[in-house]
């Protein structure tokens, strides 16, 4: 089994993701596959580019934290304020681009979800410090309590809305409120009000972070990699706009596998550990050990879920009288199977490029990611438009891309082992 600290974080994430799944299921019951829901999911994928700052901060800050364990609380406090400001700048930039290039409804959701992303990024910096210190209880509390608070908020407001006769896209707003309010609770719990001296120092750190983003080739490489990887999801969602209800179908089809991916997301802990380990053999053994254990956990769970949905999923749709056609259900089932296959490649890739970072192979990863992004755009167009496979074709394209990432990663891991 996994180490105790990994298990604690995975259990907390499992609670959080199960809560999210239940809320999304209720939204589906209330409004079905709709244009409003499509818009929400497209905006979510665009705003998620801001969340790439979390992965960037993990890679850039964990080595600093490992070297300054005695002063880690101060370091975390300073950098969380600077990252908060950097997230706001990114949110403003993406919001301006969205207002100029997209319709008003999508741009509105990009702004709103960008606000949530900013708060989430800031809270994630605090959790980095907890991981480095080995304090897993606060991390478990964060994931479990945000899910519980969010569920209570969602249920209470939904009941009140129903009693007043509200229906339709109002539930998308309720879903958003249930996401941002718990995040705000932990934001104000963990981050003290700014004092002028602290604020001035965080402005200095913000300038330093921006300087790193612009001048450091290592940092630029990481940012470029993360933006392209996150842009794959945004590109997928944008291609779904040519299919009625496409974004919603892609989200619901990929939801269960990606929830499991997020539950099994241990890349920050993994990077914190390999940053302290000195040899390539031990690092690769750690990678192999974690990957094997995650697959052993993942395969039975996802196989069971596919069987349940395959055999009784349509009966549940009919029983609950969901706004779902048989064609939409078949599309969701196909996407579920494809994403169940590709999710382990997601996890493997997330772990691998952190190994590459330790050995300063950013240029190699930039090349792999760039090729993958070009393949994704080309295959999305080919499968979804030329061959008219719609959302099904988009999911096949994503499978090809992350299979390419995994095969490339495996090849270069063997190269690393021979080199070092």
Image (cartoon, helix red, strand yellow):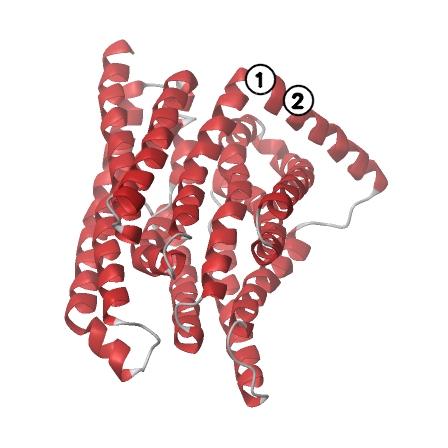
Which residue is most to the top?
Answer: 419
Query: Can you see residue 403?
Result: yes
Residue at the image position 28 percent from the left and 72 percent from the top = 325
252 lies left or right of 201: left
Q: Secondary structure at mark 2?
A: helix
Residue at horizontal 51 percent and vertical 28 percent from the top: 223
Against 281, residue 15 (above or below) is: below
What is the secondary structure assignment of the residue under circle 1? loop
State the CA–CA distance, disc 1 to disc 2: 7 Å
Residue extending farthest front: 386
Q: Is residue 299 left or right of residue 167?
A: left
Are the residues at dot 1 and dot 2 in contact (C-beta closer than 8 Å)?
yes
Identify the residue position indicated by label 1 in the image: 216
The residue that mark 2 highlights is: 211
Can residue 290 be seen here?
no
In the image, is residue 59 above or below residue 253? above
Q: Residue at x 58, y 53 (%)?
A: 103
Provide residue 322's location: percent of width, then percent of height: 33, 77
Quadrant of res 407: top left
How many marks on residues? 2
Residue 299 in the figure: left or right of residue 29: left
54 versus 411 height, above or below: below
Quadrant in which the C terminus is drawn? top left
Q: Position of residue 340 (x, y in %)?
A: 23, 51
Badge 1 or badge 2: first in the primary sequence: 2
Q: At 56% across and 27% down in the image, what residue appears?
A: 64
Question: In terms of image quadrants, where is residue 108?
Answer: bottom right
On residue 199, the disc is none
């Amino acid at each position: 089994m996994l180490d105790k600290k990994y298990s604690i974080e995975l259990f907390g994430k499992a609670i959080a993701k199960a809560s999210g799944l239940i809320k999304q299921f209720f939204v589906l019951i209330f409004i079905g596959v709709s244009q409003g829901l499509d818009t929400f999911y497209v905006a979510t994928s665009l705003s998620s580019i801001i969340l790439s700052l979390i992965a960037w901060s993990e890679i850039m800050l964990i080595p600093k934290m490992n070297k300054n364990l005695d002063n880690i609380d101060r370091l975390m406090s300073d950098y969380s304020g600077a990252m908060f400001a950097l997230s706001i700048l990114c949110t403003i930039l993406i919001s301006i681009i969205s207002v100029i290039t997209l319709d008003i409804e999508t741009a509105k959701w990009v702004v709103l979800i960008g606000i949530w992303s900013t708060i989430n990024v800031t809270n994630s910096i605090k959790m980095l410090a907890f991981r480095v210190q080995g304090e897993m209880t606060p991390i478990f509390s964060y994931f479990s309590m945000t899910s519980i608070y969010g569920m209570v908020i969602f249920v209470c407001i939904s009941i009140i809305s129903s009693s007043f006769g509200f229906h339709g896209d109002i539930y998308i707003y309720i879903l958003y409120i249930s996401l941002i309010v718990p995040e705000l609770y932990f934001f104000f719990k963990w981050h003290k009000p700014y004092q002028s001296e602290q604020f001035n120092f965080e402005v200095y750190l913000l300038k330093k972070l921006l300087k790193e983003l612009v001048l450091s080739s290592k940092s630029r490489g990481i940012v470029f990699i993360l933006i392209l990887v996150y842009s794959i999801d945004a590109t997928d969602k944008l291609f779904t706009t040519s299919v009625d209800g496409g974004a919603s179908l892609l989200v619901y089809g990929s939801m269960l596998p990606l929830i499991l991916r997020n539950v099994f997301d241990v890349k920050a802990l993994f990077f914190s550990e390999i940053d302290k380990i000195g040899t390539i053999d031990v690092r690769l053994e750690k990678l192999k050990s974690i990957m094997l254990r995650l697959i052993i956990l993942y395969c039975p769970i996802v196989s069971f879920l596919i069987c349940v949905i395959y055999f009784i999923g349509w009966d549940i749709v009919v029983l609950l009288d969901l706004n779902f056609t048989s064609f939409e259900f078949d599309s969701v089932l196909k996407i579920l199977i494809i994403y169940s296959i590709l999710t382990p490649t997601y996890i493997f890739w997330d772990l691998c490029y952190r190994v590459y970072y330790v050995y300063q192979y950013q240029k190699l990863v930039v090349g792999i990611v760039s090729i993958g992004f070009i393949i994704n755009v080309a295959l999305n167009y080919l499968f979804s438009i030329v061959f008219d496979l719609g959302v099904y074709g988009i999911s096949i394209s994503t499978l090809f891309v992350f299979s390419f990432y995994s095969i490339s990663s495996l090849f270069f891991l063997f190269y690393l082992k021979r080199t070092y």
